[in-house]
Amino acid sequence: MSEKKSEPKDRTALYIAIVGATATVIAALIGVLPNLLRNPPPTPVVITAAPAATVIAQATTLPPTVVAAMPTATEIAPTLVLSPTIGLSASPTPPPASPTPTNIVTLVLVNNLPRAMEFFVDGVSATSIDSGAYQVVPLQFGTHELKQCVYGSDTTKPENCFAKSAVLNNSLDYWEMFDAANPEPPSSPLTLLVLNQSSAPQDIYMDGIFAKTVGANTFIALRGPGGLHTIQPCPVGDNPASGKCGERRALELGKKVEIFRILGESS
């Protein structure tokens, strides 16, 4: 009987201990709770990928288009070498300056003087031409007063000019400026102009070698070293062995621009 009476006393002490511990925890929570309410939790840091850099392309300024100015050529460059020994070459026939009616003369102007010259037709300046050059001047058929003067000089003084009245009645003709008493020493290569004043095209042979075909009433330019050469015109398609060609002539090239004329069908 004594053991059953002591059990409630032991449990009472346990209950008191539990209640005291619970009160202590509650008091602690009451002291901390105001601080928790005043300090909200920190905001999380979100790391994102940096955006790619925006590349601004700078506009490239294009250089201005360069237009190659065509030089005013007074000579035509060679296009065909005849042989290593001769070294003459054929140049393309210059195109006419303008349409050529039947009453127009193609006057080939040649300057074999050591200075630039000015050319006058009927008292009017037609063109200027450098030393050792040639060019084409179209004129009407008939009589003209032709005059050459030292370029830049006083053209009213006779010592600076040479004038002559000429009758032009061929579709192709020439005017050469040359002083036989004081020839200009040539420098290689030289130019040979073959003027075909006949009514048919001709094949031209230089030193027995075909050079080029020259049309009727037009001309070609051959360039090569000076010295003695032979020239022979033939009907187109024939050669010197056929016996149908014109006379084979010796030609000494000693001026900057030489002229050879074909007057007949094959002469």
Image: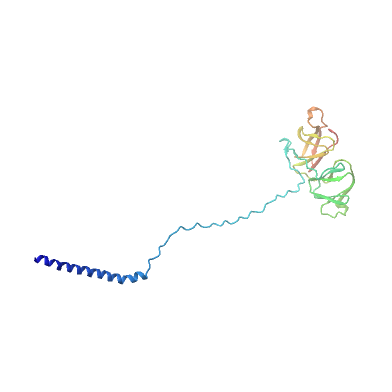
| Residue at 15%, 67% in the rendered image | 8
Residue 10 located left or right of residue 52: left
- The colour scheme is rainbow
Q: Quadrant of residue 205?
A: top right
| Residue at 21%, 67% in the rendered image | 18
Residue 32 located left or right of residue 77: left
- Quarter of the image that includes the C terminus: top right
Which residue is at the front of the view, 233 or 159? 233
**x and y percentages locating residue 53 in the rendered image:** 51, 57
- Quarter of the image that includes the N terminus: bottom left
**x and y percentages locating residue 227 in the rendered image:** 77, 38
Q: Is residue 218 above or below residue 128?
A: above
**x and y percentages locating residue 211 in the rendered image:** 76, 35
- Furthest-left residue in this view: 1
| Label tally | 0
Could one spot residue 6 in this view of the protein? yes
Q: Is residue 197 above or below residue 7?
A: above
- Furthest-top residue in this view: 242
Could one spot residue 174 in this view of the protein? no
**x and y percentages locating residue 210 in the rendered image:** 76, 33
Which residue is at the front of the view, 224 or 137? 137
Q: Quadrant of residue 57?
A: bottom right
| Residue at 31%, 70% in the rendered image | 32
| Residue at 27%, 70% in the rendered image | 26
